[in-house]
Image: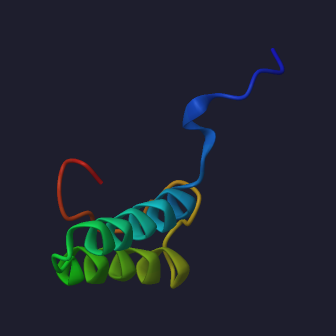
Amino acid sequence: MGEQKENSRSFISELFKKLAFTKEVAKATGKSTEAAQREVERQIGQAVRGGDPVKGKGVTKSGDDD
């Protein structure tokens, strides 16, 4: 009953994790991940400005993995 679900993380915290991951990939590979970083930053902006930062409602997604 008091168990916390794995899916209980907020949408915005997952976006920050995704942003950090894209930066790690860029650093490790030497390849640009600028487009991916801009997309995540756009989603973060939407979540903060009128979207739902917990559930992600009101944030347009770029693909199936978001």
Residue occupying the point 30% across, 78% down: 37
Please identify the quadrant where the C terminus is shown.
Answer: bottom left
- In the rendered view, would you say 32 is above or below 64? below
Place of residue 24 in the rendered image (x, y in percent of width and height, measured from the top left)? 37, 67
Looking at the image, which is closer to me, 32 or 12? 32
Q: Which quarter of the image is occupied by the N terminus?
A: top right
Residue 54, percent from left and from top = 59, 58
Quarter of the rendering containing residue 27:
bottom left
Q: How many marks?
A: 0
Left or right: 52 with respect to 41? right
Front position in the image: 38 or 63 = 38
Query: Residue 59 location, x and y as percent?
Result: 37, 68
Q: Left or right: 66 with respect to 52?
A: left
In this picture, residue 34 sits left or right of residue 45: left
Residue sitting at x 42%, y 79%: 46
Q: Is residue 26 above or below residue 25?
A: below
